[in-house]
Each structure stands twice: as structure tokens, then as C-alpha cells.
Amino acid sequence: MPERFESTTVMAGSHENWRSLLPPAKESWPQSVKIAHQQISTNQSLTIQQGLDLFDEPNLHAIGELAHDIKTARFGQMVFFNANVHINQTNICTLACRFCAFRRGRRAEDAYALTIENYLEELDKYAESVDEVHSVGALHPDWNVDYYAELFRSVKDRYPNIHIKALTAVEVKHIAKLSKLDVRSVLTQLKEAGLGSLPGGGAEILDDEVRENICKGKETTSEYLEIHQMAHELEIPTNCTMLFGTIESSLHRVKHLFHLRDLQTQTKGFQCFVPYPFLPDDSRLPDAQLATGSEILRTIAISRILLDNIPHIKAYRMNIGDSLSELALQYGADDVDGIVQQEQIMHLAGSNTNLQSSLGDLAKIVVNAGGVPVRRNSTYTRFELFDAEPLESRNLPRVRTLKVIQ
Ligand code: SF4
């Protein structure tokens, strides 16, 4: 069966020689940003100290300019998005992470666990318009590899062209434990059943002391990295993430990025990095320091600068909203999360991002940020230039005659 959209001749993907396309450092930039530019353009990774200096640098705009220059050297004006739907298969969880608004105990009134038929019914609603189903959920006490293998097989039987991006590292670990199998066997079985990639969630902050405090019982730092490494070895591409704005320091964030960069040096299996802030409510994690708008942009921009070997940086609009996503696309991000249609994890935590977006709405975000919208598939191997309305048509009128209210 043909893919849903034809690949165009867009030269999308990382220019091999992108470093040579970086414009020179600006005279006005502070020393920390000039040093970062020098390191990047001479193919030397930044040090931890240099990463920390960027977090301390008052001139946020200069950091954003360098990040955007790197993004532009790699992808020009192109900004990528896909047509996806999120289906969260269950909220019943054996853990109780302090930041999580999604999980429920088995006996909670609003606890749910989709049967395979329920799941397919959900997917049926969107299948005509999406290329990807993105499924993460809680750690269901009974679902082992058989449930997920049957689920993925059923999806593929009905919709062979829909890419399945599913399961965080901790879900994989949990399924392996319940199935009395090792992680490699679980990933192998799930790949055979139709799993296409892992979304990368659950990294939170890759520091075991922080993890002990905010997500006790989850996979350790090294387990997160090992599970992704194993996926890469099995040629299952993955994304990676960072949840920031809980109780971590800037050193924790920099070290987190270095862990990912080091694994990517070995495997080259990460497609995209997705940084997103903790969304607070009254009940969870009162000690979280939270992230302001400028801090979110700074973290996205520094991610682009430090992760010079991970091609894509995502503006995760489910979490940061459409307005901040537009700005993120000028601070180093080159990818904006898809049409989504339904999503529970971020929305239960307080997100009010529109769930009924169309591809045209995504293209509008991209055009508003000065980019050229490009629809992509899940593995960044097929692309299509998206025909978006030009920005001019949405400009404010220069003059408007207002009615005088008496
Ligand atoms: S973050 Fe995941 S593992 Fe932790 S409580 Fe929530 S659903 Fe469970």
C-alpha cells in the first residue's frame, strides 16, 4: 500500500556540512556565546562548564540567535511536523511519581484500561487523517508483552501504513519484568509485532538523586540509557526527552544533555530531543521551582547548542502551547508536535493546548515563526512541502476605522 503522502525533492535532513554553513559569531554576542559558537564551528563539543555558562548568561537573545543559526545551518527555513494521534492506553499505574497528574490506582473511579478493541475504536476515529499513533501510558499491573504484541499486530493488520511510536523506557522495563523476559527480547518481539519507534518520555532528569525524589521506583539513569541503546542496536529509532522545572539545578540539566549526547555518539539512534517543563497544579510537587517562559526558551536553545549530534529539537506544543512554540522555532527548535487530536497526560497536568489542530494550523505556527512548513513521516525519511497561506494574509491591518461607541 502506498504511503499517505508522496515524498518531494525537499532536501530535508541534516546537511553533512552544516557546521561550515554557520554564519560568523556576532560582535555583540557575550563571551559565553562566542565560545559556544567557536566550539560548534570547529566540531568540538562544549564542556559542562561552558553549558553552565550558557544557563548563567544574561543575554538570552544571543543564545537564541546562536541556536537559531545552528538550526538554520542544518535545515534552512524548514520546520517539520507530522499528522499523529495520541492514544494513552491506560492510566492504571503501579508507581506514583510526584509530578504525575495522569496515573490512577486500579480502583479509582476514573481508572481505565483500553482493551484492544477499545483502542482500535479510538484509532478508527482518526486513522484516515494520521500517519502515526503515539501511545504511552501507565504501568498496568497485568499487561505483559503479549498484550502489547497483540495490540501492535492488530493495529498493523488494520492500518499497515500507520507508524506505531509507543512505550517509554520505564514501560519497556515494566513489561519485561512482568513477562519474565529481558529488555532485548521484549523489544525484539514488539518490533516484530509492529512497533516502529520509542517516543523517549520518562527521562525526566537523568540524575538518580533527583529521580529518587520525583519518580521513585522508575528506571535509573543508566537503565533509561541502556534501554534506548538496546533499541538503537535493534534498529528501533527513538526520541529522548527532558522534564525540567521540578527540583533540578542547571548542572543537572547540563549533565542530562551530556548523557544523551554521549549515547548518541555511540549509536546515532536518537532522532529528536523533546524538552518540556513541568506543568504544576496545587497538589503535586510543591517544591518545584517551575520554569518561566524565558527559561523554557533558554533550555530549548541550549539543548540545540549542546546536542550538536541529535538532528531534531522539538517544540512540544502539548506542553508549552502554540504561542511559545512559535518562539521556540526561533530559538533552535526545528520540529513542532503534530495534530495530536487527543491527549491526556499533559492536559490532566494543566495544558490547554488545542487538541483539534489541523495540518494547516501547524503550518500557520511555522509560517508565523518565519519557517517553511514541511510535513514528515515518523522516521524523518519522507517529506512534503506544505502549501501554507502566506503570512501577509494574516497581518494586522495597518489602519482600521473603528466605530465610535456613544
Ligand atoms: S509518570 Fe508514568 S510511571 Fe510515573 S506515575 Fe505517572 S504513569 Fe506511572
Image: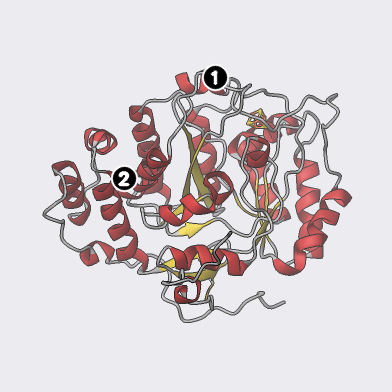
Please, what is the three-letter code of the amino acid marked with disc 2?
Leu
Residue at left 51%, top 23%? 211
> Residue 318 location, x and y as percent?
59, 48
Q: Nearer the viewer, residue 320 or 37?
A: 320
In this rendered view, identify the residue nearer to me: 283 or 380: 283
- Closer-to-camera residue (92/188): 92
Q: Which residue is mark 2?
A: 306
Q: Quadrant of ligand 1?
A: top right
Q: What's the residue type where badge 1 is placed? A: Pro
Mark 2 and mark 1 lie on one chain; the one further toward the N terminus is 1
Which corner quadrant of the image does residue 176 belong to?
Answer: top right
Q: How is the image coloured?
A: secondary structure
On screen, residue 292 above or below 3: above
Res 68 seen here:
yes
Q: According to the image, label 1 marks what residue?
A: 286
Circle number at residue 57:
none
